[in-house]
Image (cartoon, rainbow, N blue to C red):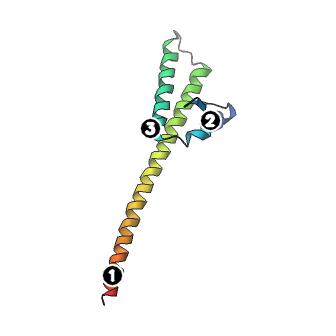
Amino acid sequence: MYMFERATKEKLRFPHNGMISVEALWDVDVTELDSIFKQLNSQLRIAQEESLLDIISSEDELLRVKIEIVKHIVTVKLAEAKDRSFFRRFFRSFRSAWRSHRSKGADR
């Protein structure tokens, strides 16, 4: 949770239709989050290429934090989608079995 605390304290913004907050990232589609991730990763690569020294600037560190936040949100969203899919299949199967059970009882 350290990264979210830091992001809110420093009021980090992410590139998406202008700039958006950390909280707004949760409302962004996974494919759009992937696009944000690619933009941030590209910025980090450029920042690292421009230096002759192995010094990590505060801007580089903030880019890394942003990248980790986007990765975390994508991971959570994908897990939630998988869970929803599992429960939909489970309840469809359960409902089908229940209807079959009830219809067998009505035949008696």
Residue type pointed to by label 1: Ser
* CB under 8 Å between discs 1 and 3: no
Q: Residue sitting at 44 percent across and 50 percent down? A: 81
The residue carrying mark 1 is: 103
Q: In this view, does 65 lie to the left or right of 80?
A: right
State which tag comes first along the sequence, 1 or 3: 3
* CB under 8 Å between discs 3 and 2: no
Label 2 secondary element = loop
Residue type pointed to by label 3: Thr
Which numbered tag is attached to residue 37?
none
List the single residue furthest toward the top: 52
Q: With respect to residue 15, does 24 lie above or below?
A: below
The residue carrying mark 2 is: 21
List the single residue furthest toward the right: 9
Q: With respect to residue 54, does 101 lie above or below?
A: below
Q: Quadrant of the C terminus?
A: bottom left
Q: Residue sitting at 65 percent across and 34 percent down? A: 6
Q: On the image, which quarter does residue 55 sit in?
A: top right
x, y percent for residue 19:
60, 30
Label 1 secondary element = helix
Which numbered tag is attached to residue 31?
3
For this rendering, which residue is in front, 41 or 104?
Answer: 104
* CB under 8 Å between discs 2 and 1: no
